[in-house]
Amino acid sequence: MRKFLVVLDDSQECLNAMRFAAMRAANTGGGVEVLAVIAPDEFNHWIGVGEVMREEARERIHAHFEVFAKWMRDKQNVDPELVIREGEQVPEILAQVRDDPDVGVVVLGAATGSKGPGPLVTQLTKNAGSLPVPITIVPGDMSKDRLQAIT
């Protein structure tokens, strides 16, 4: 089954990327893989403190994921899977695409501010030519109705 890989983070545009991935998966018989990346610099403390912070980050990710997962299950009949990786965001996304041959599309949300589409979109599009899958960039301010119409 082809999976839509979408990145879970704290950005506003993440919401539309999640919606798009779930709607496309529902309409094409695909799946959704949600990737959360924990940055290593969050844990450069004493070993015990770093472990507690790592576990807290995982708990936050699971709670955040469950909000999206419930909507995907209830509204789109899609059961997403969660993958958590530790490292720098772009290399971990690229590694996940390489490690999971079922990933068919990477879905990113683009920021709407004057500073550009956001660092993740900017960095990943620089690597787009070497990716084995296409990238879909979803405007962060696209309405639910418009998303539904194009998926």
Image (cartoon, rainbow, N blue to C red):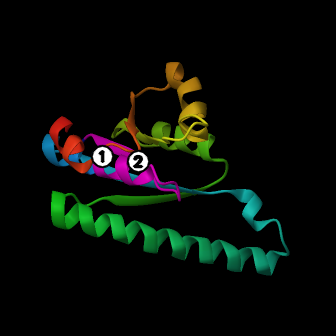
Q: Is 4 covered by the magenta stretch?
A: yes
Query: Which disc is residue 77 wearing?
Result: none
Callout 1–callout 2 Cβ contact below 8 Å = yes
Q: Is 130 covered by the magenta stretch?
A: no
Q: How many marks?
A: 2
Residue 80 sits above or below residue 132 on the image:
below
Name the residue carrying label 1: 21
Q: Position of residue 9 (x, y in %)?
A: 52, 56
- The quadrant of the picture occupied by the C terminus is top left
Q: Position of residue 114 (x, y in %)?
A: 57, 36
Picture residue at 26% right of the left edge, 40% below the top: 2
Q: Position of residue 43 (x, y in %)?
A: 76, 67
Amino acid type, mark 2: Val
Residue 124 sits above or below residue 34 on the image:
above
Which quarter of the picture shows residue 92? Answer: top right
Left or right, 90 with reference to 151: right
Which quarter of the picture shows residue 79? Answer: bottom left
Left or right, 91 with reference to 24: right
Q: Residue furthest front?
A: 114
Q: Secondary structure at mark 1?
A: helix
Residue 24 appears in the figure? no
Left or right, 148 with reference to 119: left
Q: CA distance from mark 1 to mark 2?
A: 7 Å
Q: Secondary structure at mark 2?
A: strand
Name the residue carrying label 2: 6
Q: Position of residue 145 (x, y in %)?
A: 19, 46
Amino acid type, mark 1: Ala
Mark 1 / mark 2, whichever is N-terminal? 2
Mark 1 packing: few (<14 Cα in 10 Å), some, or many (20+)?
many
Picture residue at 53% right of the left edge, 59% below the top: 10
Q: State which region is magenta.
A: 2-19
Picture residue at 59% right of the left edge, 24% below the top: 126
